[in-house]
Amino acid sequence: MRLEDLATTYGASSGRAKQKLVARMATAPLATSDALLRLHEVLCFLRAYPDDAELLRTVEAALAGFAERSDLQRFRHSLEDSGIAGTAINYRFFWPTACWLSRHWPQQLSITWEDWDNRARLLDLLPHTLPYTETLALDEVDRTDREWIEELRGDSGDAAFLTHRIGKLAGDEFTRERTYDLLDVPLRLDAHPGTPARGNDVFPVADVSFQDGALQRSRPKLREDILRPPVSIQPLSRARGERLVDLGRRAMVTRARDLDGFAHADASDARWVDCGDGLAFGLLGLKPQRRLMLESSYAALTIKNGVPIGYVLVSALFGSAAIAYNVFETFRGAEAARVFGRVLSMGKAVFGCDTFSIDPYQLGYGNAEGLASGAWWFYYKLGFRPRSSYVKRLVREERRAMKVDPTHRTALDTLEELASENLYFQLGTPRNDVIGEIALGEIGLAVSHWMAENYGADRERALRECAAHAADTLAVDRRDLSPAQRLWWTRWSPIVCAVDAASWPKRDRRKLAAVILAKGGRHESDFVPLFDTHPKLRDALVALGARRTS
């Protein structure tokens, strides 16, 4: 396809040539579904990296009309799950995403009954989701699970009925979420105007940066790039934050992904990280009740000229951050290394990190996509290094083989061994008190052990008494706290007791109170610098975890 060949060529008259091809292909029927998919992906790429305004207008018009193409109608079944407008999406979405879809498109969302191999639980669960009055029918009338849902749902869609009724179960949202996710319901979202579609889902931006030169595909000098801050970091209004959350969810749905960072995103903790040249990150914190006990976790949608081109997950604490970086397939031939450099710059600017780690799954361990993409070597060539002596030896062997034979390629089984341990990049002197090295789970076990020793099975009394003790110890009046701060005060209070904060100097206790309140504040990222500049707390938690492993 000539347009594919020209897509990443810029300068001279390239924009005009692309514009003519797009205008012609916008209405020309294609012979195969593969050709149609390839056209769609080129259009998405050109929307993110347009040469000029005329090309952008032509591309936008072609994408806006894609669902009405005659060839799309012909191939819509073979293009299911592509995320293209006018095609259906089939996926086992988790609870929050299933609820979001059923609220917005209740008639388009349905259960794929023939693919549901975990239906046995449904008949046992159904009586608990309905008024007691209806148990008479359930006890006496013989129906299959599907027949019962059809009987009970009225004019609701079957998936919308099920998610709504599970949402009414007794218990908290975590209980309801777990109940639904254990059902593992296969869902289908039929195409409809407004349903998620990759070619139409963009974030409104004031200015477009046109591509007038070659794409920057060379590897950045990562240290310099990290130290070069973003152009600006601005909080978004509630309305624009909600729009960003919506876009993040749509981007995941159309790519058969379902990530907590977007499913549980908090629109009031949304920021726009402008990196210049049309590149930005839409940074989203988690709703207070969904935040992690220790790390501060954020999701970021990578956006080029309003177009989502990938996503980032960041977990930060101890002056360090674990990074999960993904570029959507359509855009992997562009500027992946350059964009990654800006990811780390954002991590330093927002969280103050001097150490970054990539965990084994992101490197390809137990992840076929990661292995096939060569993720491990991508990060190694950028300057990330292993700490494991075994992995270091493997690297030396592979580098020797490459020196002897420049055509040598690392075997997949060797790649998986390389990927079995974290990779790290340090701005300063390497240290061990970083995410990936500190046993966070052991800290949690130590706290659980303390609670078991002091309260046995009565964890409710433990929380009540710990929260009161922590308030007395840290001189905090809980009546002055917001609901989110009260929640995190209760969650953190056993830690306050387990580290014996009552014995700390008054200044350290006052600072500890500020750390806990920041965990329940509007921007969870405020928690990180307060924690990281509290050496007494850091050392106490590290020691707590070390006692469990010694």
Image: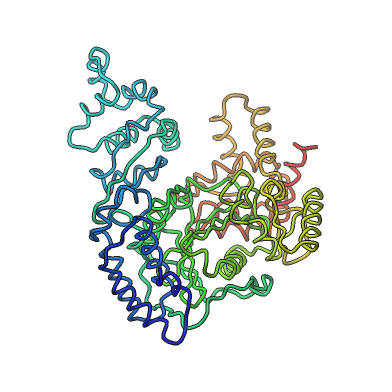
- Residue at point 22% right, 29% down? 150
374 w.r.t. 186: above or below: below
Q: Total number of numbered labels?
A: 0
Q: Quadrant of the C terminus?
A: top right
Which residue in the rendered view is the most extreme toward the front? 31
Left or right, residue 411 beside residue 37 = right
116 w.r.t. 74: above or below: above
19 w.r.t. 170: above or below: below
Query: Based on the displayed image, in which of its 4 quarters is residue 56 positioned?
Result: bottom left
Which residue in the rendered view is the most extreme toward the top? 140
Query: Based on the displayed image, in which of its 4 quarters is residue 121 positioned?
Result: top left
Left or right, residue 276 beside residue 247 = right
Q: Quadrant of the N terminus?
A: bottom left
- Residue at point 31% right, 22% down? 127
Q: Position of residue 421 (x, y in %)?
A: 71, 48
Q: Position of residue 473 (x, y in %)?
A: 64, 45
- Residue at point 50% right, 71% down? 233
Which residue in the rendered view is the most extreme toward the left? 155
Left or right, residue 240 beside residue 137 = right
Left or right, residue 430 beside residue 458 = right
- How are the colours assigned in the image? rainbow
Q: Position of residue 207 (x, y in %)?
A: 39, 78
Q: Position of residue 356 (x, y in %)?
A: 67, 59
Q: In this view of the protein, which residue sits in the foreground, 153 or 522?
A: 153
Q: In this view of the protein, which residue sits in the foreground, 26 or 524?
A: 26
